Image: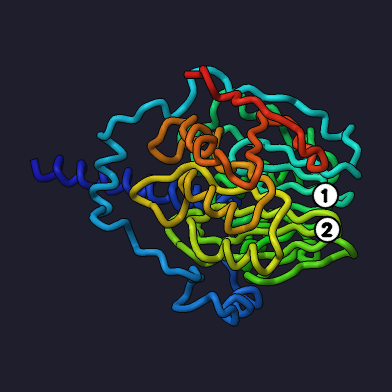
């Protein structure tokens, strides 16, 4: 009997060892990236926004919402009913031929969730592209809604700039970035994010990492301001080793602001005042939840942020492709439409792939989400 128990124990230990080895080997996959080290880490340590071994928000975020514990978060995730997180029908989309667009026309095209293609001042820019069918370490988690992947890397023209706001899976996608690499001339990102890109084969000379409140001007008449966001970073268990950021894109004719993932905070008013307002702001407007109220904005907070930024037009972001929070997939569109009534900016709600012409202030978009389950 003892011998049998000993064999069972040895077999169990062997199975556990094989599983542990498999996990270790799996975590070596390049999609998990590499954390900053060496000269990159030394530069990070000199940042005024880095302390106690990690980056810090301008306004600190409590570890968790008041009254919520990690246990309660898991219980809610597993047992609280979820209503209409994803549409039952495919999301409608327009497959614009990006190659044939006049590059001298200032255009913004939503590519789903927080991915955007821009033409500004003759430059072609891509922000946070995710063309994969899921945004997670494994394929059965965080799947994209049907109809939200009409574009691939092959559909993109040569890109002057790739902008990455932070290292979360729904913003920094290894397969997409790898496929796009031959088309990308320059990359701008927050401090530390370049460690992923270097591991994925980008030349160091093409990666421009910057701290908050830094203006990156690689050519005349086009400036990218790397600015604060209220969020966090990390692809697995390690948090805040790389910097999350927002961006302001400025040419002599236009100013565009992209919030990245961000909770509401005083940084919006500060940015609006320092850059004297924006022709267009693209703001975090989805995946909000009472259990993480400080790292994403509700639609009403996005409206307030647009006013703080002195925006002439608002385009909602972080919606329409992935279900990360427990709210109906179309609720962000409904709420921001209601909250934008009688405001001093125009609310823009294009379908995925539908061009927004920045010079056309009379352009109108339909409430395409209405009447869909």
Vertical position of residue 215 compared to residue 317: above or below: below
In the rendered structure, find residue 251 and report the number of the disc placed on it.
2
Q: At numbered mark 2, what does the secondary structure look like: helix, strand or loop?
A: loop
Density class for disc 1 (Cα within 10 Å; few <14, some 14-19, many ≥20) is: many
Query: Could you tell me residue 334's position as x and y percent?
Result: 50, 32
Residue 230: x percent and y percent?
50, 61
Q: Is residue 204 left or right of residue 297?
A: right
Q: Position of residue 9 (x, y in %)?
A: 20, 46
Instruction: Pick whichever, 60 or 358, lies toward us.
Output: 358
Q: Residues within 10 Å of mark 2 (few under 14, many from 20)?
A: some
Q: Quadrant of residue 102?
A: top right
What label sits on residue 291 in the rendered view? none
Residue at mark 1 to residue at mark 2: CA–CA distance: 7 Å
Which residue is more in the foreground, 156 or 258? 258
- In the image, what residue occupies the spot 75% across and 62% down? 224
Q: Which residue shows up at 78% across the image and 28% down it? A: 96
Q: Which residue is mark 1?
A: 120
Quarter occupied by residue 337: top right
In the image, residue 159 lies at what x, y percent?
82, 47
Marks 1 and 2, the one that precedes in the sequence: 1
Asked whether, in this view, residue 84 is left or right of residue 137, the answer is left
Q: Residue at x 74, y 47 (%)?
A: 126
């Amino acid at each position: 009997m003892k011998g049998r128990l000993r064999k069972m124990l040895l077999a169990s230990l062997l199975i556990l060892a094989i599983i542990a080895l498999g996990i270790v080997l799996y975590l070596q996959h390049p999609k998990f990236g590499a954390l900053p080290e060496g000269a990159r880490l030394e530069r990070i340590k000199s940042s005024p926004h880095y302390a106690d071994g990690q980056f810090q928000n301008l306004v600190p975020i409590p570890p968790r919402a008041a009254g919520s514990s990690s246990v309660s978060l898991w219980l809610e995730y597993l047992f609280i009913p979820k209503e209409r997180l994803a549409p039952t029908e495919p999301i409608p989309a327009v497959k614009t031929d990006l190659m044939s667009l006049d590059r001298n026309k200032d255009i913004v095209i939503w590519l789903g969730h927080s991915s955007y293609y821009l033409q500004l001042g003759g430059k072609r820019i891509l922000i946070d592209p995710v063309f994969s069918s899921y945004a997670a370490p494994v394929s059965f988690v965080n799947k994209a809604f049907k109809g939200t992947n009409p574009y691939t890397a092959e559909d993109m023209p040569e890109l002057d700039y790739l902008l990455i706001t932070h290292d979360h899976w729904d913003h920094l996608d290894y397969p997409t970035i790898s496929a796009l690499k031959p088309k990308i001339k320059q990359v701008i990102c927050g401090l530390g994010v370049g460690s992923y890109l270097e591991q994925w084969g980008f030349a160091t000379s093409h990666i421009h990492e910057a701290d908050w409140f830094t203006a990156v001007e690689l050519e005349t008449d086009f400036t990218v301001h790397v600015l604060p966001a209220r969020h966090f970073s990390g692809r697995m268990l390690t948090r805040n080793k790389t910097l999350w950021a927002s961006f302001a894109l400025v040419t002599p004719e236009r100013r565009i602001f992209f919030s990245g993932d961000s909770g509401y905070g005083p940084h919006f008013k500060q940015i609006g005042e320092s850059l004297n307002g924006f022709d267009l702001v693209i703001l975090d407007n989805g995946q909000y939840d009472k259990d993480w109220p400080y790292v994403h904005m509700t639609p009403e907070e996005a409206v307030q942020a647009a006013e703080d930024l002195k925006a002439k037009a608002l385009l909602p972001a972080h919606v329409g492709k992935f279900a990360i929070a427990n709210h109906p997939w179309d609720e962000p569109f409904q709420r921001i439409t209601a909250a934008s009534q009688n405001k001093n900016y125009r609310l823009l709600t294009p379908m995925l792939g539908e061009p927004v012409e920045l010079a056309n202030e009379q352009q109108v978009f339909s409430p395409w989400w209405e009447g869909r389950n």
